[in-house]
Image (cartoon, helix red, strand yellow):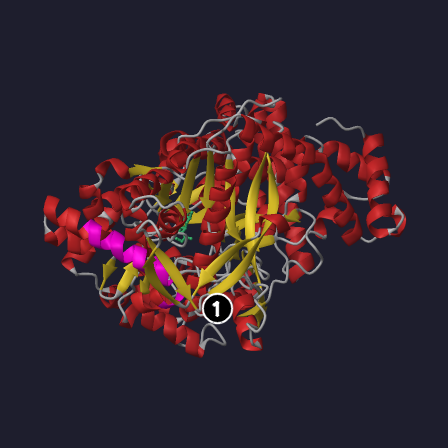
Amino acid sequence: MSLTVTQFKKDFKKRLHEKYAIEVEDASNVEWYGALGSLVKAYYSKSLRKTHKQYIEEETKQAYYFSIEFLPGKMLKSNLLNLGILDVVRDGLKSMSIELEDVMEAEPDMALGNGGLGRLASCFMDSAASCALPVHGNGIRYDYGLFKQRFVDGYQVELPDSWLQGGNPWEVRRENKAVEVRMGGTIALVPDNSGNLIPRYYNAKVLRAIPYDTHMVGYENGVVNNLRLWSVEIPVTEEGNYLTLEERQEVENITAVLYPDDSNYDGRQLRLKQEYFFVSAGLQSIVNYYLRSGQAIEELPEKVAVHINDTHPAMCVPELMRILLDEAHLSWEKAWNITVKVMSYTNHTLMAEALEKWPTQMVEEIVPRIYQIIQEIDRRFVADVSEQVGCDIANRTRIIQNDHVHMAHLAIIGSHSTNGVAKIHSDLLKNVVLHDFYLLYPERFNNKTNGIAERRWLQLSNEELSGVLDETIGKTWRKDPGALKLLEAYRKDKKVLKKIAQAKQHNKKNLAAFIKQEYDIEVSSDAIFDVQIKRLHAYKRQLLNLLHIVKLYLDLKENPDRHEQARVFIFGAKAAPSYDYAKTIIKCINEVAAMVNHDPDIKGKLKIAFLPNYNVSLAEKIIPAADVSEQISLASKEASGTSNMKLMLNGAVTLATLDGANIEIKDAVGEENIVIFGLTTEEVYQYYRNNNYNAREIYENDPTIHRVLNAFIDGTIPNISREGQEIFDSLVKYNDEYFTLRDFNDYVKGQETIAAAYQDTERWGEMCLMNIANAGRFSADQTVERYAEDIWHIEAVATEE
Ligand code: 9GP
């Protein structure tokens, strides 16, 4: 959009007057933010209406991305960038003595997600709008987002994230689009006048679902899509049918708080209610919208695609069946045919503990009609498959097994596409985890390697490097991340390498200042900034990183004058509140940090900064300053990873196992620009097959490992008598589930390779450059375009710019 500084200032002042009856100079940053947010929303509202109208007039097929998590982070700067008014607004504010950065401080992080899954959903929303693809999100408007993390005595403490407290300028409550969702009670099927069996509900709770729409602004293209988040409200009940206080509380809880579990299945009732609530509300509103266009319900797959992001929204399958059977009165066969064509599913994990299985009794109690439909889907599936390929495979793949509903099975059987999120992950799905399904439906399986919103992770968060890129290769990369490849031509150009290094140094200094100011830890920007930022989980092996730090520390203690590359180890990680082992690792990292950071013998050669409350905004500060990207999960465990992509885009060199998307990063940058270590997936599987891994033997025979592990139990590391023992036992007594000790020496070598490369400035510079130059292929723009073409069968709309 076009906007002058003068016009902006006029609009901004007017908004402040209208909204807060205040002058610019008297307002707080919260008021500046509130006014600016609502002004920006007004700026894109015309495009919103235009996009909406265009979809209706052109009868565009639209896709709906159902996800129980969305993790957009802050939206102000991203919206300004995408509208093409970032500089105008920044300048306009400056001329009124306001720094944009101060205004941004007032925006809470919208953290309605745990980690990779939710952030991916938000990257897709940004990319879909930017690629002019008709894709909308559907999720839950939690009153409280992911908990805020504090450290007290080194322990994680969780505080509520009341992100809505100060109001949310981006959302619009759509009262007239509210729908009703039924839960509980019992069902009887009774014939209507024409003999159709119609469900009659007894004592069901009718919940009111209110949508709040947040708009997804495309990058300089005039497209604005929608993210619809549902909030529950107490329904207006018929007279005499009041809810007790307890019942009201029960209803309100449904959208009160995000489940803080990541890669883990938690079988609690409330979670199941959340899942059905947003699935039912979302599908009802989609079908209502579709029917308003006057098209026949039989044609639904021509105009609507519904994506099941992980298994949480898998009830989309029976819920659409319910709508088609009970409300549109289609036959089972017709309804099933439509449902399978409309639905598609992404699997995001190979971890058995993350695959949802709900007790049948619970499903029947909470969603009785849905349970009936699931039973019927299952019955027909078993009959068909048994007849075609035999009972064994039918029994292994059926939806209801051992009194549990297997949500992944439901999603695969009820959709036309199942994809993994990196090549190796999709292969493992086909060949191992979902092999039976692959035999049944080979054509349904495909891979869509994850991607990232490169605008946010480079243009917005790393303006310094962005400037160097503009000077070196022009500005096309800003719209087309593939153009980053042009940088490769400069891999030997010392001037360019120097400029990139200077940008990194600038970012490192900023981060160092932030760490000093917020956490009083002094770090030198000349040290390697070695970064591991992700959820705390045993399979991600933050512990491997810690063991190496302890080794370096012990080496330095033994020989304080030893020449050692200075390093700052930066961690960011939240542990699920109920995940005790992960919390133990947090405590240990914090205690090692306290010990190392204050030990004069170390002479500042090692520093550890575990930054609390890792979230999108903190990631935006850390990633531009990273030298090394730690991607060290046990091979075969990380489905893809996306921080690996963000870090390479910012010129960090990856230290990685051959897991998830690391493999594709290696292919993209070449072996000489990444450091790979550790077991391969095949080797891990071999250990499983032969059942011959012996961690105690490693501990007993390897003096270095022995020494490092003993430090956890002999008092060397203070204040961890319980936690140190727990770590020690997990590795030695319980045989080291994630092969940490097996990979340790190889990891140490990898770290040595990194240190040596870092000391050779030109070599390191070239490695950084090659990472930046080859990050374009991990743009989420490309990923969503592949989803659009191969899975959703939707097309981009014509745009004005
Ligand atoms: O653990 C995966 C992570 O590897 C992946 O990058 C992300 C997005 O696809 O999804 C994560 N999975 C979950 O959070 C839960 O399945």
**Measuring 60% from the left and 30% from the top, which residue is drawn there?**
53
Query: What residue is shown at x 35% (from left), y 55% (from top)?
Result: 198
Image quarter of the N terminus = top right
Which of the two residues, 628 or 557, is positioned nearer the viewer here?
628
Near mark 1 (Cα within 10 A), the count class, few <14, some 14-19 or many ≥20, is some
Q: Secondary structure at mark 1?
A: loop
Q: Which residues are magenta?
A: 365-381
**Most foreground residue, 193 or 97:** 193
Q: What amino acid is at disc 1?
A: Pro
Percent x, y of residue 538: 38, 61
Q: Is 515 within the magenta? A: no
Q: Quick check: 458 above or below 191?
A: above
Name the residue at 59% across, 61% down: 143
Is 243 drawn above or below residue 589 in the view shown? below
Residue 495 figure quarter: top right
The residue that appears at 64% across and 56% down in the rendered structure is: 515
The majority secondary structure of the magenta stretch comes to helix
The stretch drawn in magenta includes residue 375: yes
